[in-house]
Image (cartoon, rainbow, N blue to C red):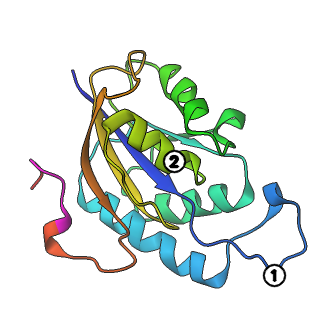
């Protein structure tokens, strides 16, 4: 059974707030960006089993806004190891996912998420704030260089276009 990994970069954070990196919240723009990501994800009609979210405030807030758009939000796990800027560290996070989880959302940070998706697929996927990359893999434990197939890459806040659905979905 193939697994689906939805990689989301957190929405735009507020650099004007005097806070540690981990505590930096979303900017107004970020609070506007995240809901379209959730609406796009809801339109894909994926049966999401789990969300793995960085503990950084901006990542948690992004996921809350995205999840609010879903009819059936998955169980959410705030994962310390997802607070990284290194794509190779995300490989370890994904390898530890339960094989019973068919579709998982990972909410993280750049440059880690772009490096991670490129390592998995061999394709560069631009992930500006609140962007999504959807990757298909054979198993979580077996993820590594070249083991994934990029199914989608977009930022729904830019334009919710009818042709942005995943292949094979209605």
Where residue 136 appears, as percent x and y from the top left, is: 27, 35
User: Residue at point 21% right, 20% down?
Assistant: 1
Q: Identify the residue under disc 2.
A: 113
Q: Cα distance, mark 2 to mark 1?
A: 24 Å
Whether residue 23 sits left or right of residue 38 in the image: it is right
User: Residue at point 40% right, 66% down?
Assistant: 37
User: Residue at point 51% right, 28% down?
Assistant: 91
Depth check: 47 or 118 in front?
Answer: 118
Whether residue 86 sits left or right of residue 21 in the image: it is left
Mark carried by residue 159: none
Q: Does residue 134 sit above or below 19 in this rendering?
A: above
Q: Are marks 2 and 1 in contact (CB under 8 Å)?
A: no
Q: In the rendered structure, which segment of residues is drawn in magenta? A: 164-168
Looking at the rendered structure, the number of numbered marks drawn on it comes to 2
Classify residue 89 by image quadrant: top right
Where residue 65 appears, as percent x and y from the top left, is: 54, 66
Q: Identify the residue under disc 1.
A: 16
Q: Secondary structure at mark 2?
A: helix
User: Residue at point 48% right, 57% down?
Assistant: 67
Predominant SS of the magenta segment: loop
């Amino acid at each position: 059974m193939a697994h689906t990994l939805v990689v989301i970069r957190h929405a735009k954070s507020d650099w004007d707030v005097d806070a540690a990196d981990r505590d930096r919240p979303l900017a107004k723009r970020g609070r506007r960006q995240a809901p379209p990501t959730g609406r796009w994800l809801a339109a894909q009609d994926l049966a999401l089993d789990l969300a793995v979210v960085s503990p950084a405030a901006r990542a948690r807030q992004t996921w809350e806004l995205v999840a609010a758009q879903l009819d059936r939000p998955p169980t959410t796990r705030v994962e310390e190891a997802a607070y990284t800027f290194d794509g190779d560290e995300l490989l370890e996070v994904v390898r530890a996912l339960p094989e019973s989880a068919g579709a998982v959302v990972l909410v993280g940070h750049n440059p880690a998420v772009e490096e991670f998706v490129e390592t998995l697929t061999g394709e560069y996927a631009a992930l500006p704030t609140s962007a999504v990359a959807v990757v298909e893999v054979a198993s979580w434990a077996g993820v590594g260089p070249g083991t994934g197939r990029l199914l989608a890459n977009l930022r729904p806040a830019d334009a919710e276009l009818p042709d942005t659905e995943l292949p094979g979905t209605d």
